[in-house]
Amino acid sequence: MARTLVTGGAGFLGSHLCDFLLEQGHTVICMDNLSTGSIENIDHIRSEEFSFIKHDVTEYIYVQGKLDYILHFASPASPCDYMEMPIQTLKVGSLGTHKALGLAKEKNAVFLLASTSEVYGDPLVHPQREDYWGNVNPIGPRGVYDEAKRFAEAMTMAYHRYHGVRTRIVRIFNTYGPRMRLHDGRVVPTLIYQALTNQPLTVYGDGSQTRSFCYVSDLIRGICQLLVSDITDPVNLGNNHEMNILEFAQHVRRLSGTSSEIVFKELPVDDPKTRQPDITRARECLHWEPQVSFEEGLHKTIEWFSTRVLR
């Protein structure tokens, strides 16, 4: 039976990973300092094969016994979080990644880094392939997250090349689904919350900026396929169906049944104008691609949010 550590395991993606790994027969250790994660996300797990450790991974990490896999998902991930916690974001991407890699080296465990499409910045290449180096403003307000993840990738590859650690890097594109925080500032929870509470739906700029939305179960399946592969180069995971934010707001309004109007506000600094993954590598090497339709995924997400907002 595999024994697996998930840092950031009480967060949106981390908690879904814990669920999936348990279903696959792993013994799972969830580690989180709960700065953005929540015990509610893992409260449903009642298993002898699951344990929770409250710990900040920027400090020395101690786990007794063997570890087969370490999935490093600890990090603020929404703009409002990493702008409120800029130094913590930089520390978890640098010190936290260093500590987690050191543990992987000690335990001879496979290490998987949760990186992000934000390493591409405001891209000049479309769609974004893994060999694109990005267009990132290192001193802008979003730079604390972008550069933390870029550093984390560099550190991961250094441990792979110098120490022989078996590493994987997933670059995660926009993902949505149950357990997103209501007020984390990202477009999916923001617009759904506004729709369910009959507030105006906020669209920034003219809404022409694009995103590609992947349902959480598709992403988790792809991450776990990458984990057991032998691919050390970064792999994009996300839905390659692109839409602009105004279209997304219209879908939310239709599926939620709200009569809320759409209002436009000033575009945030360094907000990417386009975001669409090239998933050729995932298709060819992992035989993976998204399966949940946007309509189905958005319906499930609105349904989940409605049980939180309207109760």
Image (tube, helix red, strand yellow):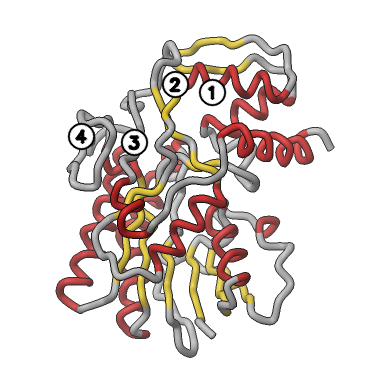
For the question of whether residue 145 can be seen, the reply is: no
Q: Are marks 1 and 2 in contact (CB under 8 Å)?
A: yes
**Circle nearer the N terminus (3, 1):** 3
Compared with 28, 191 (above or below) is: above
Badge 2: few (under 14), some or many (20 or more) residues near its Cα, within 10 Å?
some
**Callout 1 amino acid:** Phe
Compared with 100, 92 (above or below) is: above
**Callout 2 amino acid:** Asn
Q: What is the distance, in whole Å, between disc 2 and disc 3 at their CAs?
A: 21 Å
Residue lying farthest bottom?
Answer: 65
Q: Which residue is mark 3?
A: 142
Q: Which residue is mark 1?
A: 248
Q: Secondary structure at mark 2?
A: strand
Q: Secondary structure at mark 4?
A: loop
Q: Nearer the viewer, residue 79 or 310?
A: 310
Where does the image place residue 292, in percent across and percent down from the top left?
56, 43
What mark, if any, has residue 135 been given in the picture? Answer: 4
Q: Which residue is mark 2?
A: 244
